[in-house]
Image (tube, grey):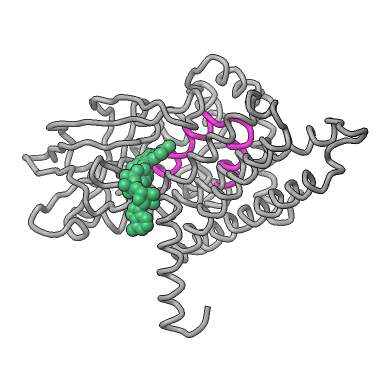
Amino acid sequence: MELLFSTDENRYRAAVRDFLLRTDAKGVEREIYERDFYPRELYNALGEAGLLAPVLPPEYGGLGSLTCEAILAEELGAACVPLAWIHSTSSYVYATIARFGTEEQKDRILDAMRTGAKIGAIAITEPEAGSDVMRIRTHAHLEGDYYVLSGEKRNITNGSKADIIIVWARTDPDVEPARGMSAFIVEQPRIIAEDYKLLGGFPGTVNSHLKFEGLRVPKKNVLGSVNEGVRILFDELAIERVLYAAMLVGEARPVAELALDYSMQREQFGTTISRFEAVNFKVADMMTKLAAARLMVYHTTRLLDAGYSAEKESAMSKLLASEAFFETAHNTLQILGGRGLSEYPAEWAFRMARLSMIPAGTNEIMRYIVQREVYRTWRKNKSL
Ligand SMILES: Cc1cc2nc3c(=O)[nH]c(=O)nc-3n(C[C@H](O)[C@H](O)[C@H](O)COP(=O)(O)OP(=O)(O)OC[C@H]3O[C@@H](n4cnc5c(N)ncnc54)[C@H](O)[C@@H]3O)c2cc1C
């Protein structure tokens, strides 16, 4: 029982944990670490068990709860990183379609995503447009009943595997992108994709460079209104950042547990190393920061569930979670000494925690958002 959660949320978390134990998701993660494969079948099983997409409204088979979606992200992160990655961008896609899609789009797509039959990707970043998303060059023009899209997108998680990709493109070249950008639901993508090898990319995770030239997307697949893509983008990013942070808090958990276990067993100078302050203070620091990040995540999902915008809190969540994960991985390596450099999961965790400071907006951009919102509030209300 976790006091942070309601009875229903605790019940949902117990069902997710039970599924992950029953399917030996940790064992699957270990297997993937050794022989690199994409755990699509396990993701399908998660959907078939009715545990995917709790953020969807009840009429689409969900629980209407972003908090439960974050619980899922956290538990998947703790149990099986490649599974958590499939869930990550898929969840941003179904959450965004649920918020902005037409009835026809929702009927056609959400069920297939909730059952795990289809997975998703989010395509914002381009070679020239990273932190500065307003520089995107991908463009689309209308030809009859189709928009024709051309451009390229980089670092797209699930990119080469996704069935449904939300792609942002410029639709009005005569105005600045903020007023002339639209979001498109691209299905059955016929896109040239090349997967990256990333520092920190866990085996079984996919991150791709996508190129498309003259891709025909039916007009009915515009998400929201034409030229209103920026509103959808910022809404999506707030959800993406907090769910990404939840996953990181989960990923850090087995790493912290390893530090605890190892320090209680390893003996040097006639005692376990957990007795040395230089070791146990590291444990104190990592647990304190992880607890703070976790609380921030669920505070943010509660704000979003209640209908508030939470751009600042979402940025704070991502910032806190990635830095707490990095500190946890860093301290765990030190506590494990030489063994940490070669042994799973300590060695990958360090690389992966370093990676986490870049996706969903770099940590510099998270700080930029936080300070901007803090100054804005102070200027307006003289109160925080
Ligand atoms: C593993 C991974 C998964 C990803 N998944 C996706 C995905 O699914 N979909 C997607 O669209 N994108 C995805 N991305 C892309 C990611 O969002 C971008 O990498 C990120 O936004 C940064 O853009 P950039 O890499 O072009 O760096 P740049 O924007 O070029 O930044 C370079 C450096 O300059 C700093 N900088 C830039 N502007 C400022 C500023 N105003 N103030 C201070 N510092 C600044 C940055 O913080 C950074 O340190 C992913 C990236 C990674 C690594």
The extreme top residue here reads 35
Is residue 110 in view?
no
Image location (x, y in percent) of residue 101: 32, 48
The residue that appears at 46% across and 65% down in the rendered structure is 370
Residue range in magenta is 70-95
Q: How many marks?
A: 0
Front-most of residues 249 and 347: 347
The residue that appears at 75% across and 46% down in the rendered structure is 283
Front-most of residues 142 and 319: 319
Image location (x, y in percent) of residue 276: 84, 44
Residue 326 quadrant: top right
Q: 371 above or below 156?
A: below
Residue 92 quadrant: top left
Image location (x, y in percent) of residue 79: 63, 32
The extreme right residue here reads 270
The residue that appears at 35% across and 25% down in the rendered structure is 195
Decide if residue 114 is on the left or right side of residue 229.
right
Is residue 302 in view?
yes
- Magenta segment, prevailing SS (helix, strand or loop): helix
Decide if residue 143 is on the left or right side of residue 209.
left
Image location (x, y in percent) of residue 347: 60, 29
The extreme front residue here reads 269
The extreme bottom residue here reads 382
Q: 57 above or below 200?
A: below
Decide if residue 258 is on the left or right side of residue 310.
right
Front-most of residues 366 and 242: 366
Q: Residue 91 colored magenta?
A: yes
Q: Residue 82 colored magenta?
A: yes
